[in-house]
Image (cartoon, grey):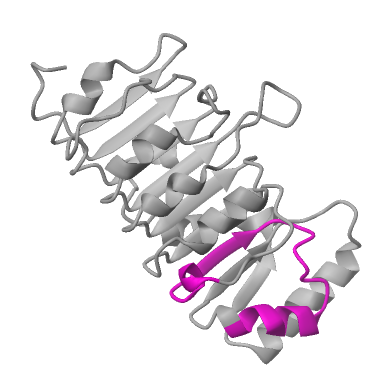
Amino acid sequence: MPQLPQLQRLHCSGSSGVPSAVWRCSQLTRLVCEGASLPAAAPAAGALGSLQALALLHCPCGPGREALPVVLCPALSGLTRLKISQPVAGVGVQAALPAAISHLSSLRLLHLERVPLGKPGLTALSHLPPSLTSLFLPVCQLPSLAPGRYLRGLRDGWLPPRLGLQDWECVQDRLIFLRNLQHLCLAVDTRDEDDDLEALLDVINERSEVVAWADTDCEFLLELAYDSEEDWPEFQDS
């Protein structure tokens, strides 16, 4: 790795882990880790200043069972896109989102799949910057959307079921905080009646400027958010 100072894109897969020398690739802009553990040591200050996109797909949990290593967060102030996908429910140990994610002060797109979001995770989300424009949480344990400045610029949202959006009045309450929302995709819950969900989506589309639909057809939303990542398809794969 030290012999590749101009390396800009890297895809690491397998159980051997990501070499610690990756943190010395100062020109690295996009990193995909698939099933590979990240180095335990923290990157040197400014070492990842060029990193803009990071995908952690089915990677082992960190020492504190965090989905994103806490020691890595302070080095990601320039990161604009982050995807974390954990294994399917019941397979392996699910990691939680660390509060240190609030260090990601330039983040525009956050895509989490099967990442439990308890109270610490919700607190961390509420401290994300207003630069966030796309928030995808399709298969996450999320009881609510906490108010916060991260909602100010949110344009695209893919939200999990059981989020307090059962009727139009609840949606109106959320739209007060989501003033710039343009596209809303609601994940389908098998416990919900299809007719009720369709009726709610019809009301949203009729009474607001938000375009809403069920997640059985969310390719359009993904294409909008990943418009500049067409040559980096790993970010769209689960």
Q: Does residue 141 lie above or below 164 as drawn?
A: above
Residue 229 placed where, x, y %? 34, 48
Q: Is residue 236 visible?
A: no
Quadrant in the rendering for residue 195: bottom right
Q: Does residue 38 lie above or below 217 as drawn?
A: above
Using the image as rendered, state which of residue 51 and residue 235 is in the foreground.
Answer: 51
Q: Is residue 146 visible?
A: yes
Locate residue 103 relative to residue 173 in the image: left or right. left
Residue 174 placed where, x, y %? 66, 78
Quarter of the image where the N terminus is located: top left
Residue stretch rendered in magenta on the structure: 148-176
Residue 181 placed where, x, y %? 53, 77
Using the image as rendered, state which of residue 18 and residue 217 is in the foreground.
Answer: 18
Using the image as rendered, state which of residue 5 and residue 224 is in the foreground.
Answer: 5
Residue depicted at 26% across the width and 51% down the height = 78
Q: Does residue 13 lie above or below 44 as drawn?
A: above
Residue 66 placed where, x, y %? 54, 33
